[in-house]
Image (spheres, helix red, strand yellow):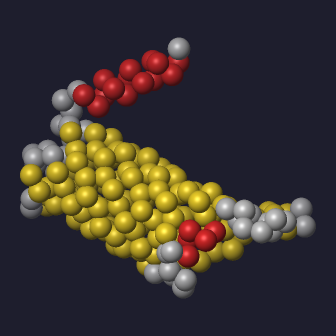
Amino acid sequence: MKLSIMLAAIFTLCVSNIMAQKETKPLSFGLGVEAGAPQGAFSDLYSLAAGLTVRFSFHAGPGFITLTTGAVGYDPKTIVVGQKKKVGLEIPVRAGYKYIIHHHFFVMGEAGYAEFKSYFGQEGQLVSTSTGSFIAGPSVGVQFNAFEISVRDELNFRSGGGGVVGLRLGFNF
């Protein structure tokens, strides 16, 4: 019952005619759910990436200057029986530009910095390691009123490389 009410509310918000990211609106923010498949060296350790992001958009020219941050968790693979799994958490901060191609379609490029932490158990204690790196990636997507969906190919420039090919479902206010 609660799930059906929540889905009805989300549907109502998505189809309503909300002024989100219209050319007359100078500032907006959005919440997004992201999920993706780790690539390169990340795919050796992790099977899935998923998280929540917040995006601020400032109208400039035919598009929007963007600032995105959030948290993305990485689900570890079991590589060798008995080896400790390392859960990953990435905190990205990306800036970019979202160019509106035609009415509902857009392309976007973002670059920034990400702090990546790995958590694992060792002798009954929770231990973490941390590293940071430059990140960058293009996106393509479509938006209808306040709802948007996009596909991103993000590269992580830390040693060993890697990245994520992912999907973002967002709602802009």
- Residue 173 in picture, x, y percent from top left: 28, 40
- Residue 168 in picture, x, y percent from top left: 38, 51
* Image-based side of 34 in relation to 110, left or right: right
Residue located farthest toward the top when viewing the structure as drawn? 1
Who is closer to the viewer here, 94 or 142? 142
Q: Is residue 52 visible?
A: yes
Q: Residue at (55%, 76%) from the top-left corner?
A: 41
Q: Residue at (72%, 62%) from the top-left corner?
A: 78
* Image-based side of 4 in relation to 107, left or right: right
- Residue 57 in picture, x, y percent from top left: 26, 55
Who is closer to the viewer here, 78 or 14? 78
Residue located farthest toward the right when viewing the structure as drawn? 123
Q: Residue at (69%, 74%) from the top-left corner?
A: 129
| Vertical comparison of 105 with 14: above or below | below
| Vertical comparison of 146 with 73: above or below | above
Q: Residue at (49%, 69%) from the top-left corner?
A: 39
- Residue 70 in picture, x, y percent from top left: 47, 56
